[in-house]
Image (spheres, rainbow, N blue to C red):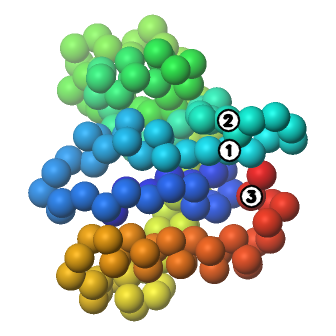
Amino acid sequence: MHLLTDSRGVPLAALISPGQRHESKYVAPLMEQVRLQGPCGRPLRRPRRLAGDKGYSYPGIRQWLRNRDIEAIIPYRSDQLAQGHGQHESFDRVAYRKRNAVERCVGWLKENRRFSTRYEKLAVNFQAMIDLAFIQRYLAVGFSDTA
């Protein structure tokens, strides 16, 4: 399961994929699901910044984000630094520390036994359970806080 949250840990989108596929393959489809409501006008399609761990440090992901004017807050892997990638770019460590909101949201989901064990055989049923959990989370934090 791939999860996208805002900076407060409120879930925005989730995507189910096979367990053997690398998570970096699902950044674009997951981001395309997001619609952020601003104070007025049509919903925004993309955030200003995206934080991820080193598993998302691939040139294709960085280029995809750059093409959409999204700042990548993703640390470079050690093999990339050895090749000279990322030495000229600054890394926002303060913003990266806020990435724990995603981990807290995943932890919140896994507190429910239904998600940690995954009783549903079909992905569509599992996605429905995730959607219900998102609704529960939205009700807990309040609708006005998700905008």
- Residue located beneath label 1 in the image: 36
The reply to whether residue 42 is visible in this rendering is: yes
Q: Name the amino acid, label 3.
A: Thr
Are there few (<14), some (14-19), or many (20+) residues within 10 Å of tag 1? some
Whether label 1 touches label 2, CB < 8 Å: yes
Note whether 116 is above or below 58 in the view shown: below
Of residues 49 and 73, the one drawn nearer to the viewer in this rendering:
49
Q: Dot 1: what SS?
A: loop
Judge left or right: residue 84 versus residue 51: left
- Residue 124 to residue 103: above or below: below
Closest to the camera, between mark 3 and mark 2, is: 2
Residue 46 locus on image (x, y percent): 59, 34
Residue that mark 3 sits on: 146
Sooner in the amino-acid sequence: mark 3 or mark 2: 2
Q: Residue at x 45, y 8 (%)?
A: 88
Q: Is residue 18 above or below residue 36?
A: below
Is 122 positioned to the left or the right of 11 in the image? left
Mark seen at residue 44: 2
- Mark 3 or 1, nearer chain start: 1
Q: Nearer the viewer, residue 75 or 110?
A: 110
- Disc 2 packing (10 Å; few <14; some 14–19; many ≥20): few
The residue carrying pointer 3 sits among few (fewer than 14), some (14 to 19) or many (20 or more) residues within 10 Å by Cα, namely some
Considering depth in this image, is 107 or 64 the residue closer to the camera?
64
Q: Residue at x 64, y 62 (%)?
A: 10
